[in-house]
Image (cartoon, rainbow, N blue to C red):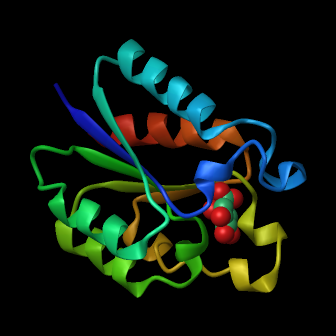
Amino acid sequence: MKRILVIHGPNLDLLGKREPKIYGRVTLAGVNKLLKKLAKTHKVSVEIFQSNHEGEIVSKIGGAKKGSVSAIVINPAAYTHTSVAIRDAIAAVRIPTVEVHLSNIYSREAFRHQSLVAPVASGQISGFGEKSYELGFLAALGLL
Ligand code: DQA
């Protein structure tokens, strides 16, 4: 069975309470429930990981050896805009990766307009709330 790794970056554990006007009322548990349902429907396995620590995310990507993880769906959150290390980890493992964001990062502050991850991702989905994860997951299925 193909395996998809979903990675949630920093502060996404606070979804539901965190700036609801921007991120909505959905909780991380709600997002994960949706992802598990999608995985079941499409007969793939899903591993879900959240961390507030850059190095832990880098190690998780590095450990996702080609073959055991078929695709990655990642919301790098604030690290999107700062982390050369996460970008390099994605480039190193060469596993097809979909970048997702709940909010439209291009309609927000200028510092969010640049993604260091986008150039090494297969594509990016931004601005559809929790639906971004659904679209991202479906895009990842298409890359398997
Ligand atoms: C985010 C957008 C980022 O700019 C921000 O730092 C986040 C969440 C999103 O999902 O919209 O933490 O990745």
**Numbered circles on residues, count:** 0
Image quadrant where residue 27 sits: top right
25 to the left or right of 15? right
Q: Residue at x 55, y 64 (%)?
A: 10
Q: Residue at x 53, y 85 (%)?
A: 82
In the displayed structure, 9 sits above or below 110; it is above
81 to the left or right of 24? left
36 to the left or right of 85? right
Which residue is nearer to you in this view: 78 or 88?
78
In the image, ligand 1 is in what quadrant?
Answer: bottom right
Q: Residue at x 20, y 74 (%)?
A: 92
Q: Quadrant of the N terminus?
A: top left
Which residue is nearer to you in this view: 32 or 14?
14
Image quadrant where residue 88 sits: bottom left
User: Furthest residue to the top?
Assistant: 41
Q: Position of residue 138 (x, y in %)?
A: 47, 34
Which residue is nearer to you in this view: 128 or 22?
22
Q: Position of residue 96 (x, y in %)?
A: 30, 55
In the displayed structure, 117 sits above or below 38; it is below
Q: Position of residue 47 (x, y in %)?
A: 31, 38
Q: Quadrant of the C terminus?
A: top left
User: Furthest residue to the right?
Assistant: 21
Q: Residue at x 73, y 52 (%)?
A: 127
Q: Position of residue 79 (x, y in %)?
A: 53, 75
